[in-house]
Image (tube, rainbow, N blue to C red):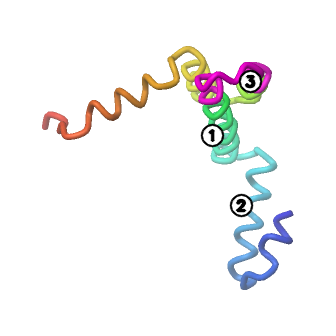
Amino acid sequence: MAEKQTANLPANLAGPIRDLIAEFEAKETPEARCAKDADKIECLLQAREYQAQGYRLTQPWVDTMVAAVKTESGRRLAEAAVRVPVDEWWRDIVSSYGTRPAS
């Protein structure tokens, strides 16, 4: 798929992009494992948002994404995403708008 997606790019750009995609798919570097977990956590958050909207059949999706996360920090984030009510993190961020951290 990367070949097709980068086919019309200049070779000096297409090559590095293909290399990064291969690294991501291989999951052999810490960066690739982190990126793969981030992808799974994004899907998990999306499933949790659907749950909050009343979609009942999302639990297998949630369970699959939680199980797919491999790094320790990723597992902690996934556990928090399941434990914390979906809109709580957003309320915390919005309530901090206009405030400045103490220097």
Residue behind mark 3: 58
Quarter of the rendering containing residue 58: top right
Side of 47 relative to 85 (left or right): right
Residue at horizontal 51%, vertical 18%?
85
Q: Earlier in the sequence, mark 3 or mark 2?
A: 2
Relative height, residue 1 to residue 50 (above, below): below
Residue at horizontal 68%, vertical 36%?
43
Indicate which disc residue 50 carries.
none
The residue positioned farthest toward the bottom in the image shown: 10
Q: Which residues are magenta?
A: 48-62
For the residue carrying disc 2, how many other residues have a C-alpha within 10 Å: few (<14), some (14-19), or many (20+)?
few
Quarter of the rendering containing residue 74: top right
Q: Nearer the viewer, mark 3 or mark 1?
A: 3
Q: Position of residue 40 (x, y in %)?
A: 69, 36
The residue positioned farthest toward the left in the image shown: 103
Image quarter in which the C terminus is found: top left
Q: Separation of disc 2 and disc 1 at Cα?
A: 15 Å
Relative height, residue 56 to residue 2 (above, below): above
Side of 31 relative to 14 (left or right): left
Residue behind mark 2: 20
Q: Nearer the viewer, mark 2 or mark 1?
A: 1
Q: Secondary structure at mark 3?
A: loop
**Amino acid type shown at disc 2:** Leu
Residue behind mark 1: 38
Relative height, residue 20 to residue 82 (above, below): below
